[in-house]
Image: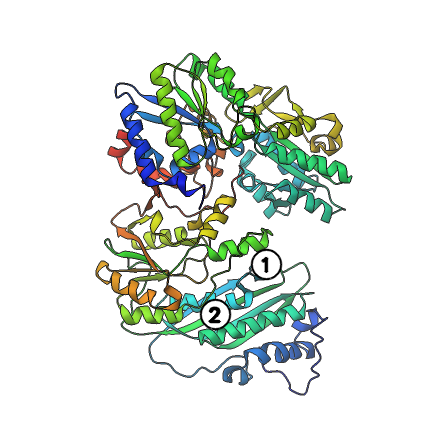
Amino acid sequence: MKFVDEYRDQELARTVAAAIAAEADPDRNYHFMEFCGGHTHAIFRYGVQDLMPENVHFVHGPGCPVCVLPVSRLDDAVELAERHGVILCTYGDMMRVPGTKQRSLIRAKADGADVRMVYSTLDALKIARENPGRQVVFFAIGFETTTPPTAVALKAAEAEGLRNFSVFCNHVLTPSAISHILESPEVRDLGIVKIDGFLGPSHVSSVIGSQPYEFFAEEFQKPVVIAGFEPLDVMQSVLMLIRQVNDGRHEVENEYTRVVTEEGNVKAQALVSDVFELRKSFAWRGLGTVPYSALRIRDAYADFDAEKRFELSVKASREAKSCECPSILRGVKKPTDCKLFGTTCTPQSPIGSCMVSSEGACAAYWTYGRFRDQQPAKLEAAE
Amino acid sequence: MTAADPKLAADLSRVRGSVDMTHGAGGRAMAELIRDVFHKHLANDYLAQGNDGALLGSVSGRLVMAADSHVISPLFFPGGDIGALSVHGTVNDVAMMGARPLWLSASFIMEEGFPLAELEKIVVSMALAARQAGVPVVTGDTKVVEKGKGDGVFISTTGVGVLSEATDISGSNARPGDAIIVSGTMGDHGIAILSKREHLDFETEILSDTQPLNDLVAAMLAAVPGIRVLRDPTRGGLSATLNEIAHQSKVGMVIGETAVPVKPEVAAACELLGLDPLNVANEGKLIAICGADDAAILLAAMRSHPKGLDAAIIGEVVADKHALVTMRTRLGGMRVVDWIAGEQLPRIC
């Protein structure tokens, strides 16, 4: 496959691995946080860790849109489907995320709620057109990557005068979350989470560009390399990060030049800014309330805002007891540090969001990497 | 599916007509439907007996029975339909025991309002599939459910086959050192279904691989009578099937990513959708496990059969009390090949 196989080539991987091994200083450890779940997924799916020297460590970050959605917002979505009787359209992974008391959208569907999995916002619009007598709500989640398609849907709904369509907006922003992690006591003061640099988001950066990361690379003196999702992208980016660390530099570099530019997709940015505005604060699972970290629908499109169209009750949402997702999302703990991991919490019966989403650290670790636990010598060596 | 009265009126008006509750009520309409649609196309001596069951006669050897229900959406997909699939699925389940499939039963649950013309297309396809597999449908049943209580048509088939005394095939027979072989490319069926269901227009149409495998299995057993395991990787794909066998046999497996045959167009579709081809369903492929010494002979026998041209050795069975299936990735690392949790869902971004 053109433009895919080249980035999974074993010979090239060996070459990059040799360069990493040659340039990584054996007297120090390198801890790089991959913000995106896509990177976590790639690292485990292709066994990238096996090609790294023992002193290069990946710290799994919060960059999975499914994982960071707080329980309360999921409870709201379930309520929209159950109490308000809407057709709730959602991307696949959200179906299985457990809310309060393990209630998920897939459970609600089994109990009779009309929850439908869609591949795009256009599918949700189509469902609205085909069901004029029903209210259709698109459960919008995701980082900057999925925001423009939601904006397109809102504009299309307005242009068509589609009165039975609305969006439950949960779009969140990457740079604010990274800043928040770097500001956290675990990173800044306590040193519990060691982060020497970031593998920066790739798809997100294709929209917002590499520029938004320059502030915190400077402010927090951490190098950032915007990295593609293919395994060779990840490896090359690790090499670039190691070089920055060794040189004492802290710059934003772009490995993913085939897609990402400094300024990003200006047209998409304008579209998003036309439809959405910043929320003053938004609660993230694992990170707590993060200021200016999410988007809401502008008043001009208020008619299509599900939060305004439907009255949602204020509920006491509850995370599952003993679930370490919040700490795992901050990089404070590893999946194997959670006592539920692989016992009561597996992809088959997930307790926490990190085990539900295929981009979640726990799911990636369990699905692709758990053999590492069963070879203690190798695991210790990898640490 | 008892025989219908030949004197009944024959006009089912299939061009415009649709299934209604009378077609399941046991009266004239049902008899006409059975005669003019089911018996007409599936005709054989057993159905012609016209009784509530089929008298099959005696066979020599051990009997194998397998059942399968088909609830696929869409009913018609590139490369097949529910009719052919309902034959292939059960024929293959019997064949995966190493048995020679002999007879099938077919039960139809039809939803009120389902077009009779489409029903006939399904039955015609089923009849063709049965003829090609050499396994007649000897008895059956029809029921009608109210509109909204079905999904067009559900078909449940049962197959009976005969197994020689010498054959010992089971998911619990895999031993460390054995070779793991697949008969062809993985994921064709699942991607064909998905492309149709989700209206994804790929540049190249991907066809389902649905086909009967009893002839391939017969050729394989003739070459290597000591095949230890046979299984068709249907729902859950290759990953689920290997995990099932690993757990049954209490062994581990190591496969190579580059050794697993996947059509470029299927791989491309999987990339686009964020799916893993190892998790995607197949309907006309099989996995065989045999002793290492027999692997080359079995592979040659498979490749000399039209349904095994792309057969490949993809890995080996290893000792592992955790029964893990692992894979050396294209990149050179290792990872677990897990069975999927629930339905495989595309990633968000």
Q: Quadrant of residue A155?
A: top right
Label 2: which residue? Answer: B158
Q: What type is the residue that disc 1 sits on?
A: Pro
Q: Residue furthest bottom?
A: B7
* Structural crowding at the residue carrying mark 1, measured as other residues with C-alpha within 10 Å and reported as few (<14), some (14–19) or many (≥20): some
N-terminal label among 2 and 1: 1
Of circles 2 and 1, the one toward us is: 1
Image spot of residue A118 (x, y percent): 60, 44
Image spot of residue A42 (x, y percent): 42, 36
* Structural crowding at the residue carrying mark 2, measured as other residues with C-alpha within 10 Å and reported as few (<14), some (14–19) or many (≥20): many
Label 1 near label 2: C-beta < 8 Å?
Answer: no
Horizontal side of A318 relative to A226 (left or right) equals right
Horizontal side of B93 relative to A96 (left or right) equals left
Q: Quadrant of residue B326?
A: top left
Chain of the residue displaying label 2: B
Q: What type is the residue that disc 2 sits on?
A: Thr
Q: Is residue B326 visible?
A: yes
Image spot of residue A31 (x, y percent): 36, 22
Label 2, secondary structure: give it: strand
- Of residue A329 and residue A81, the one placed in the foreground of this image is A329
Vertical position of residue A353 compared to residue A251: above or below:
below
Label 1, secondary structure: give it: loop
Horizontal side of B162 relative to B235 (left or right) equals left
How far apart are the two marked residues, 2 and 1, measured between alpha carbons? 22 Å
Label 1: which residue? Answer: B74
- Of residue B4 and residue A60, the one placed in the foreground of this image is A60
